[in-house]
Structures are given as structure tokens and as C-alpha cells.
Image: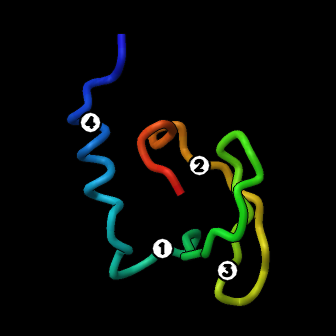
Amino acid sequence: MPRPKRNILAAAAITSAPPDLLSDGQSLARVIKAVGNNIFLVEQPSGKELTVELSAQFRSVLWI
């Protein structure tokens, strides 16, 4: 049975704009390339490149 759409839409609404403050473990990054299977190559403002995975909560809901 699929998850209720209202949960997905609520999660998307919360994360649609960047937060005013970031905690110590968080940073904003720019997506450079989709590597595949919900894995992306991103670049931090410092220029450091990272490989990250899109949370399962957003798979099939948000596209980058």
C-alpha cells in the first residue's frame, strides 16, 4: 500500500526553502551530476565535492 500523499507533500513543503540557520553537521551544496540510483555528486561552497544519497523519503517525489 503506498504512503499517503499528504505526508510526502508536507515533507516537500518543509524542505522547499533553505533554512535560516544550519546546525553544525549541515551545509548547503550544489548538485553537479546525477551519478545514478539516487546518488549525486555535489559541490560545497568551499569547492569540496561529495557523493551523497537522496533520502528514501524523497525518492519518486522530488527530481533534481
- The kind of residue tagged 2 is Leu
User: On the image, numbered disc 4 is attached to which residue?
Assistant: 7
State the SS at label 1. Answer: loop
Spatial separation of the CA atoms under disc 3 and disc 1 = 15 Å
Q: Position of residue 64 (x, y in %)?
A: 54, 57
Spatial separation of the CA atoms under disc 2 and disc 3 = 16 Å
- The kind of residue tagged 1 is Ser
Spatial separation of the CA atoms under disc 4 and disc 3 = 29 Å
Q: Earlier in the sequence, mark 1 or mark 4?
A: 4
Q: Quadrant of residue 4?
A: top left
User: On the image, numbered disc 2 is attached to which residue?
Assistant: 54
Which residue is the extreme one toward the left? 6
Q: Position of residue 62 (x, y in %)?
A: 44, 48
Q: Residue at x 32, y 51 (%)?
A: 12
State the SS at label 2. Answer: loop
Question: Would residue 42 appear left or right of 20 to someone viewing this image?
Answer: right
Question: Relative to 45, is 15 above or below?
Answer: above
Question: Relative to 35, is 29 above or below?
Answer: below
Q: Residue at x 54, y 44 (%)?
A: 55
Q: Earlier in the sequence, mark 4 or mark 3?
A: 4
Q: Earlier in the sequence, mark 4 or mark 2?
A: 4
Other-residue count near label 2 (Cα within 10 Å), few / some / many at <14 / 14–19 / ≥20: some
